[in-house]
Amino acid sequence: MLYIQESLRVEAPIEIAWAWISDLERLMKVNEFHVSMRFETDQRRGKGTRVHIVHSFFGSSPEVRGARVTHWEEGAGIGWVETDLKEPRGNFPHSSQYRLKPLPDGATLLSDELRGSLNLPFLGKVADRLMQDVFASRIVRRECAYLKAHIEEFAAGWKAGRAAA
């Protein structure tokens, strides 16, 4: 099992950070392999929301995986599990968690967490460790940087809009 957690300070109030991340269509496309997504039903928010995420790994042909929101704490966090629709126990089933905590001076601590396993019978824990150290930790760091930049840009637009009103 691999486990990665990155946290960073976002210069935006938690309410604005939540407004950005609680848009699942936007949040689920933060991962660089998530090309697009679509909701399975009319439900767009909250625990139990189901989606199909189209992946492309380094330019590979599109692959659809299913995701289900397993954690929704209004104003504080979102999490989901993602699995291959044809082989739920194979092809790296994993979970993603995003958490927000208020910090002094109107900032927010953003945490991005990834757990999963390649479930390879011949390499097992070694494969997970290699994936974590060589590949997945970089992906999570890039996600955090992306989230920070876009939430702060969103916050700047929000402040400008309020000032103009």
Image (tube, rainbow, N blue to C red):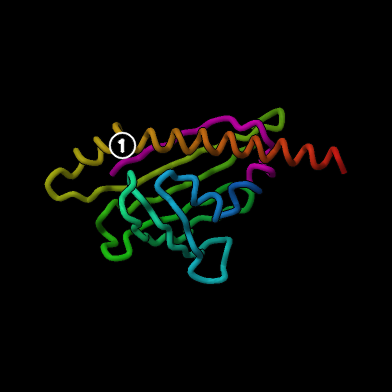
Say left or right for 9 vs 90.
Answer: right
Magenta stretch: includes residue 4: yes
Q: Which residues are magenta?
A: 1-18
Residue 132, position in %: x, y?
31, 36
Q: Nearer the viewer, residue 16 or 26?
A: 26
Q: Is residue 47 above or below residue 98?
A: below
Residue at 47% across / 59% down in the picture?
37
Q: Nearer the viewer, residue 137 or 35?
A: 35
Q: Quadrant of residue 66?
A: bottom left
Outermost residue on the right side: it is: 165
Look at mark 1 in the image and give the residue it sits on. Answer: 132
Residue 4, position in %: x, y?
38, 37
Q: Is residue 48 visible?
A: no
Outermost residue on the left side: it is: 122
Question: Is the residue marked by circle 1 packed among few (<14), some (14-19), or many (20+) residues within 10 Å?
Answer: many
Q: Amino acid at mark 1?
A: Gln
